[in-house]
Amino acid sequence: SPEELDHRIAAARARLGSKLVILGHHYQRDEVIKYADFTGDSFKLARHAAEQEGIEYVLFCGVHFMAESADILTPEHVRVILPNMAAGCSMADMADPDDVYAAWDEIHEVLGEDARIIPVTYMNSAASLKAFVGERGGLVCTSSNADRALRWAFERGEKVFFFPDQHLGRNTGYAMGIPLDEMVLWNWRLPMGGTTPEALRKAKIILWQGHCSTHQRFTVEQIEKARREHPGVHVIVHPECRWEVVQAADSYGSTEKIAKTIREAPAGTTWAVGTEINLVNRLAKQNPDKTVFCLDPVVCPCSTMYRIHPAYVAWTLEAIVQGQVVNEVRVDPETRKWSLVALERMLELG
Ligand code: 13P
Ligand code: SF4
């Protein structure tokens, strides 16, 4: 029962004391987020992981790439645990490292070995891809600093190779003033990414054709309907939404920015939100003086975030208490070295 799990989790936490920190991403369900010492977006949680002192264990209630990043950013002896190893990210899985390496080589075959291309990976990617960009003069970004990351990259190169999320790359590039016809999509399933040498030569940004299935559900029609039915509504969406959706919205930002914007909004305002349903429902509960609802009437959960259940939290914490760490996420030393460089470049952006 929930009460029994509460009791078991509290008992394990009491035994571990300040050796343990529990981090919870905004998309976690209420039954899990209530155990978190810190909540936030991917960037804020990465920073919390990096800044903790004296801890031995991080229990990461989120998805695999977030736990990997926490492992990279914490000292070697800190053990990072993902309550359920099946909590991945389908977007991160769309960038298989071998496909990215092959694309990088093909792009250089066309543009020449000395082409000044800076690789930028979204946080939602495997640690080996973070290492790949670190070793090649690039960096990691999250949805809260993608604009600064792209500026950083364009100070050092002429083109950016951005993966895995085409939408975050396109939305951010466009907001910086790069026209859509100077961005080219790379479809890894097709020879030469399905593009042409001319398009590659013209492009400022080469976008990997990845996407988030949860955020691709949002449409311009949903925004039009919200505006018809709720005059004066503010529409705020995550930048993993399609370009047309971001253009039709009033504002966009990371999960933390969405939460902060609604928290700080005047009482009586109405918010239509284009992001994962657990966060939207929580924002509705936490802001009873405002009207907050999801743009998608059918509900749009992130099925992998949902794989973290209190029973896994109890099981993994009790295992630590018994001295048998389970579900540890550990990045090998070579990958760690270069992925840390790429993550630190991002943290230095502020
Ligand atoms: P945030 O960095 O905005 O929390 O986003 C992470 C994510 O996976 C969104 O789908
Ligand atoms: Fe990945 Fe989308 Fe889930 Fe975020 S919401 S973790 S991008 S699948």
Image (cartoon, rainbow, N blue to C red):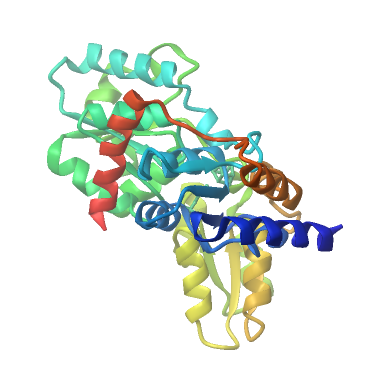
The image position of residue 135, as x and y in percent, is 24, 27
In depth, the one of 46 and 22 nearer the eye is 22
In the image, is residue 202 above or below residue 50? above
Where, quadrant-wise, is the C terminus in this rendering? bottom left
Write the residue at 78% across / 57% down: 5
Write the residue at 60% across / 52% down: 219
Q: What residue occupies the far right of the structure in this picture?
A: 1
Say whether residue 274 is visible: yes
The image position of residue 339, as x and y in percent, is 32, 34
The image position of residue 41, as x and y in percent, is 48, 57
Where, quadrant-wise, is the N terminus in this rendering? bottom right
Asked whether, in this view, residue 224 is left or right of residue 123, the answer is right
Say whether residue 177 is visible: no
Asked whether, in this view, residue 44 is left or right of residue 307, the answer is left
In the image, is residue 39 above or below residue 285? above
The image position of residue 178, as x and y in percent, is 27, 46
In depth, the one of 132 and 280 nearer the eye is 132
Q: How many marks?
A: 0
In the image, is residue 125 above or below residue 282? above
